[in-house]
Image (tube, rainbow, N blue to C red):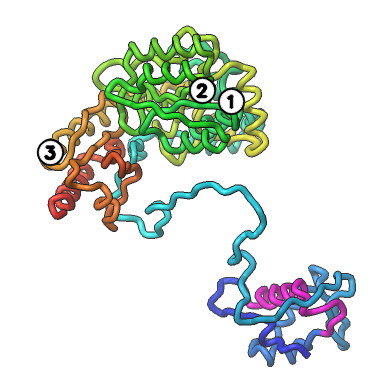
């Protein structure tokens, strides 16, 4: 008889019940061809003695195997592997080199995506985290949102509404959002021009999949939002970079490229470019729109933090200007309410929205209808506007407070331009102080760092004044010790 003490592997520190471990071990032995159809298994008393466990545990394991048709049990006679299983050739038995199935690598061909691992994969949260521009959840109307959400899950008609048409976004949210974007951004749209997504990144990905391909070309600024670049590269398109200066993307450089090759799309973040926070000037906005008409390329406009402008009223989006429907406009509520609230939107002509909806359904049949309708309620009742008014005042104060701290304590080490709005600053270190030294500090995590430019993005909106002061003091001590 087989040495079952080696066939059955029991780990008493494993959270899996021992009877399940026994059952899985026997199943694996059958699949490996070690136990053949019809093979007699030890009796429950004999196996419990061999394994040094209670007989009831073995009985439970056999019951589990019987229920799944792996074995047959003849009471008071014997237990055997089922005859209805295929006969497999035994594999080489090497107990010193047996790995659980998912400890092996996937050995068949598959597409490979460049995975860049950093501190985001660590299990211990650092003392200080400098994000790249998150809202302060502590001042967001999350309680009101969740209260409305809960109420919608207890009424028959709201349950029905929440489960209808979520592939494009609930009609209620699209109606309220169309009105809201008209009032705040000057967009003349209807519900057919809106797709509700799980954040701006999904909007960018869907757009890239429909517009771009292996023979396409897209222009981006440099430096740029890495996740957008990754979405474009995955289509096989050529990604061409143009400089970003204090006035935003260089439109003259875009024009030079258009004269030499067919450009399919330009990705632009005109309000506050990511990561540098600069605003695309009025002149360059006009030039970009004219270039789009002349050379027939799409504009993918990422307007992730439109609502935060401090020194004047914000520029209206490119999408609000006169164009031929060639601007795909994306935004998100993550920068307003909470980064974990994955609700974004796309604005485009109806036929493009239809195709994006069809593509989205292949990987995601729809969003959270209750949450979308709860958000629609906040918009309709004016709660979102009231929150933005309060948040804009608080974030403005935090930006100015951080500006004072940086000038006071870090001026020998850094340079920066105070942004006119947004939720973050772009900090460049002087060459003698490499940003990689900050990255390697175990107490600190910075979400957006550019080693080539020796710079990082300092998100200030999520920190109160005490937290800002603590963070700047830490940076001062760290930089002074280099």
Name the residue: 26% across, 30% down: 394
Element at badge 3?
loop
- Of tags 1 and 3, the one toward the viewer is 1
Q: Which circle's residue, 2 or 1, is located before the other in the chain? A: 1
Tell me: residue 86, above or below residue 322: below
Image: magenta residue range: 17-40
Q: Which residue is mark 3?
A: 411
Q: Nearer the viewer, residue 460 or 319?
A: 319
Q: Which circle's residue, 1 or 3, is located before the other in the chain? A: 1
Q: Nearer the viewer, residue 420 or 134?
A: 420
> Residue 274 sits in which quadrant?
top left
Q: Quadrant of the C terminus?
A: bottom left
Based on the picture, tell me whether residue 63 belongs to the magenta stretch. no
How busy is the neighbourhood of tag 1: few (under 14 within 10 Å), some, or many (20 plus)?
some
Horizontal side of residue 337 vs 444, given as left or right: right
Name the residue: 30% across, 15% down: 313
The spot of residue 113 in percent (x, y) is 54, 47
Residue 265, numbered label: 2
Q: Nearer the viewer, residue 467 or 408?
A: 408
Look at the numbered discs 2 and 1 and tell me whether their residues touch, using CB distance below 8 Å. Answer: yes
Name the residue: 38% across, 20% down: 253
- C-alpha span from label 3 to label 2: 40 Å
Residue 211, numbered label: 1
- C-alpha span from label 2 to label 1: 8 Å
The spot of residue 317 in percent (x, y) is 41, 16
Look at the numbered discs 1 and 3 and tell me whether their residues touch, using CB distance below 8 Å. Answer: no
């Amino acid at each position: 008889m087989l040495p079952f003490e080696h066939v059955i592997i029991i780990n008493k520190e494993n959270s899996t019940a021992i009877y399940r471990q026994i059952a899985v071990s026997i199943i694996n032995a059958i699949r490996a061809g070690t136990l053949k159809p019809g093979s007699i298994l030890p009796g429950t008393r004999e196996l419990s003695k061999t394994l040094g466990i209670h007989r009831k545990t073995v009985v439970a394991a056999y019951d589990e195997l019987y229920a799944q048709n792996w074995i047959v049990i003849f009471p008071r006679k014997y237990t055997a592997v089922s005859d209805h299983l295929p006969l497999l050739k035994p594999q080489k038995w090497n107990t010193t080199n047996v790995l659980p199935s998912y400890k092996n690598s996937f050995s068949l061909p598959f597409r490979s995506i460049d995975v860049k691992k950093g501190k985001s994969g660590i299990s211990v949260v650092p003392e200080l985290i400098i994000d790249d521009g998150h809202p302060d959840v502590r001042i967001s109307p999350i309680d009101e949102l969740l209260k409305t959400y809960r109420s919608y899950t207890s009424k028959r008609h709201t349950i029905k509404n929440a489960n209808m048409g979520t592939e494009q976004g609930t009609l209620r949210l699209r109606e309220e959002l169309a009105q809201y974007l008209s009032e705040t951004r000057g967009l003349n749209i209807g519900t057919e021009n809106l797709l509700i997504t799980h954040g701006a990144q999904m909007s960018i990905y869907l757009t890239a999949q429909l517009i771009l391909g292996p023979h396409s070309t897209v222009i981006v600024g440099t430096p740029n939002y890495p996740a957008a670049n990754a979405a474009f590269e995955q289509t096989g398109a050529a990604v061409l970079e143009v400089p970003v200066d204090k006035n935003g993307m260089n439109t003259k450089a875009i024009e030079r490229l258009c004269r030499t090759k067919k450009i399919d799309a330009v990705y632009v973040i005109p309000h506050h470019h990511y990561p540098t926070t600069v605003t695309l000037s009025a002149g360059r906005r006009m030039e970009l729109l004219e270039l789009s008409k002349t050379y027939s390329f799409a504009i993918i406009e990422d307007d992730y933090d439109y609502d935060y402008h401090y020194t004047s009223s914000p520029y209206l989006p490119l999408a609000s200007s006169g164009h031929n429907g060639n601007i795909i406009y994306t935004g998100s509520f993550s920068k307003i309410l909470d980064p974990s609230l994955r609700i974004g939107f796309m604005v485009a002509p109806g036929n493009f929205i239809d195709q994006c909806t069809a593509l989205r359904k292949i990987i995601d049949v729809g969003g959270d209808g209750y949450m979308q309708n709860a958000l629609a309620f906040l918009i309709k009742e004016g709660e979102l506007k009231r929150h933005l008014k309060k948040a804009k005042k608080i974030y403005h104060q935090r930006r100015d407070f951080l500006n004072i701290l940086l000038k006071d304590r870090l001026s020998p080490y850094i340079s920066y331009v105070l942004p006119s709005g947004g939720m973050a600053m772009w900090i460049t270190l002087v060459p003698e102080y490499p940003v990689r030294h900050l990255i390697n500090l175990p107490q600190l995590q910075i979400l957006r760092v550019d080693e080539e430019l020796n710079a990082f993005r300092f998100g200030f909106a999520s920190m109160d004044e005490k937290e800002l002061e603590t963070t700047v003091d830490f940076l001062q001590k760290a930089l002074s010790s280099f």
